[in-house]
């Protein structure tokens, strides 16, 4: 008497772990994030369902969280454009350069107007 029939093909998870990479579309990544965030799936369950490993699900959740925080802080370039951290840093550096230029100019004028010392 034969036991239950087992599918000889590996599951998606086994195929993923065997070196075949599963690429998820951004909309699928968002779905993974929402399912984990709302408690519909654990990270392990979501990994199994979408054919990726738990580390991938963890990375998706971290990226989504950071993207949301950046968007709420106004530093995201998605949607309503804010300034990227690099743009903010560049702007601050330019202000510092202008401040130093003004200081050097003032000092040069003061030196030029000072009577010579003997």
Image: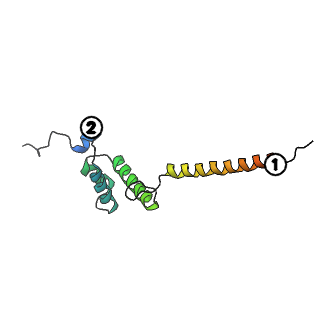
Residue at position x 27%, y 48% in the image: 25
Residue at mark 2 to residue at mark 1: CA–CA distance: 75 Å
Of residues 56 and 111, which is closer to you in this image? 111
Residue at position x 27%, y 41% in the image: 16
Q: In the picture provided, is 13 more to the left or to the right than 79?
A: left
Label 2: few (<14), some (14–19) or many (≥20) C-alpha neighbours in 10 Å: few
The residue wearing badge 2 is 20
Rendered position, 86 above or below 40:
above
Q: Which corner quadrant of the image does residue 31 belong to?
A: bottom left
Q: In the picture provided, is 66 more to the left or to the right than 113?
A: left
Residue at position x 29%, y 46% in the image: 52
Of residues 94 and 48, which is closer to you in this image? 94
Query: Of the residues under marks 2 and 1, which one precedes in the sequence?
Result: 2
Q: In the picture provided, is 74 more to the left or to the right than 48?
A: right
Q: In the picture provided, is 40 more to the left or to the right than 91?
A: left
Q: Which corner quadrant of the image does residue 117 belong to?
A: top right
| Residue 88 in picture, x, y percent from top left | 52, 53
| Residue 32 in picture, x, y percent from top left | 30, 54
Rendered position, 23 above or below 81:
above
User: Which colouring convention does the figure follow?
Assistant: rainbow
Rendered position, 22 above or below 61:
above
| Residue 46 in picture, x, y percent from top left | 28, 53
The residue wearing badge 1 is 113
Quarter occupied by the C terminus: top right
| Residue 12 in picture, x, y percent from top left | 22, 44
């Amino acid at each position: 008497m034969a036991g239950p029939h087992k599918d000889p093909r590996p599951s998606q998870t086994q195929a993923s772990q065997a070196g075949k990479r599963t690429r998820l579309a951004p909309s699928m990544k968002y779905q993974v994030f929402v399912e984990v965030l709302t408690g519909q799936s654990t990270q392990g369950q979501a990994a199994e369902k979408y054919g990726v490993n738990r580390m991938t699900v963890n990375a998706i959740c971290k990226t989504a969280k950071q993207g949301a925080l950046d968007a709420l802080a106004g530093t995201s370039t998605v949607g309503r454009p804010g300034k990227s951290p690099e743009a903010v840093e560049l702007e601050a550096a330019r202000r510092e350069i202008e401040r130093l230029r003004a200081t050097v100019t003032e000092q040069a004028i003061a030196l030029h107007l000072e009577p010579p010392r003997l």
